[in-house]
Image (cartoon, rainbow, N blue to C red):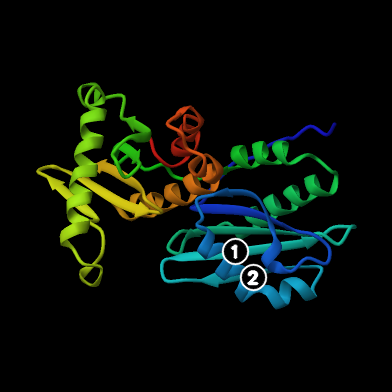
Amino acid sequence: MNKLRTGKSQSILGFCILKLGNNQSLNDYELVFKKGLRDPLIQNVIESNKQEIMQKEKGNSIIPLDEVMIIIHFFEDSYQNKIILIFMDDKERDINFTQLYLISKEIFKKFSSQINHTEIKTFCNEIIKIPQSEDLIGIFILNPSGSPYFTKINKERAGLANKDVQISGFISAILTFSKEVISQDSGGNLKEINFGNQRFFTIIRNNVIFAYLVENANKLFKRYMQIVVDEFFSSYKKELEQYNGDISPFKGFENTLNKYFKI
C-alpha cells in the first residue's frame, strides 16, 4: 500500500474534491471530500465551468467573487474519470497559486495510484487547514418540541453546561411563539434573540432548530453556521427520517463541529 506523505500544510477558507465517472454528467459527481464550502457554491462553480471540464483532459480556472477567490483544477485519469479540486480563499490574501496546484497534482497522483478514499481524506485533513471560529459559546440542535438531537457548550462555560436542557426548552418556546406572530412576508422565522451581552442565532430547516449561542459573530462565524446545518443534514438524513428518540447516532457530529469552531 502506498504511504501518504504530507508536505507543508496550506491555510485557506475552503476546499473540496469531486470525482466524475466516465460517461457521467456533471450533476452526478461524487463528493469525495469537503471542508469549508457549501453545496450551492460547489454546484454553481461546476455549472459555470462545465463546458471546459467536460471537453478538456485537464485544466484550471480562477473565479473572483465579491469577497473570495475560487481556484479550480481538474484532471482526467487513465479510466477517463475526472478529478475536480476546488479551493476558496479570501480575495484580499496573497494566494499561493503554485502551492495549490502542487497540492492538486499530489492528490490526483493518489487517485491514479488507487489509494482508497479514507486515506485521501486523511491526507487532505492534514494538508488543508481552514480557520476555526472562536465565537461559539454553545450549539443546540433540537426537534420542534425542544428535545435535543445534539448539544455542545464551551468547556470553559461549565455553569452553562449544566443548564442545556432548560436552554433547549426555552429556545423552542421562543421559536414556536415567533413563528405564530411573524408572518412569512415580514421575514419568516426568528433569526436572532438578544440576551444582553449574548445572542442566539437561529436557523430552522426541515423542522430542525439550530441555535448558536454567541457573544460576537463575525463573517466567518455566520458562514460556518450555514455550513454546519448543511453537513448535519447530509450526515444524518436517514437517522432523522427514522428518529425514535435515540440521540446516540448524532454524537459523532462533534467531529464536524470541531472542524469549524474552537469550543
Q: Quadrant of the N terminus?
A: top right
Q: Residue furthest bottom?
A: 51
Which one is in front, 91 or 76?
Answer: 76
Q: Pick whichever of labels 1 and 2 is earlier in the sequence.
A: 2
Choose top left, top right, bottom left or bottom right for residue 166. top left
Q: Which residue is mark 1?
A: 71
Instruction: Residue at 54%, 43% (x, y): give it.
Output: 235
Choose top left, top right, bottom left or bottom right for residue 163. top left
Instruction: Residue at 45%, 32% (x, y): give it.
Output: 254
Q: Secondary structure at mark 1?
A: strand
Instruction: Residue at 70%, 60% (x, y): give it.
Output: 29
Q: Secondary structure at mark 2?
A: strand
Residue 209 position (above or below residue 86) = above
Instruction: Residue at 82%, 59% (x, y): give it.
Output: 81
Q: Which residue is mark 2?
A: 61
Which one is in front, 59 or 177?
Answer: 177
Q: Residue furthest left?
A: 196
Looking at the rendered structure, the kind of residue marked 2 is: Ser
Q: Are marks 1 and 2 in contact (CB under 8 Å)?
A: yes
**Left or right of residue 253, residue 107 in this image:** right
Label 1 to label 2: alpha-carbon separation: 6 Å
Image spot of residue 83 (x, y percent): 74, 58
Residue 185 position (above or below residue 188) = below
- For residue 263, say whether it is visible: no
Residue 112 position (above or below residue 62) = above
Looking at the rendered structure, the kind of residue marked 1 is: Ile
Image spot of residue 38 (x, y percent): 50, 57
Image spot of residue 10 (x, y percent): 57, 46
**Left or right of residue 74, residue 249 in this image:** left
Residue 253 position (above or below residue 232) = above
**Left or right of residue 44, residue 67 in this image:** left
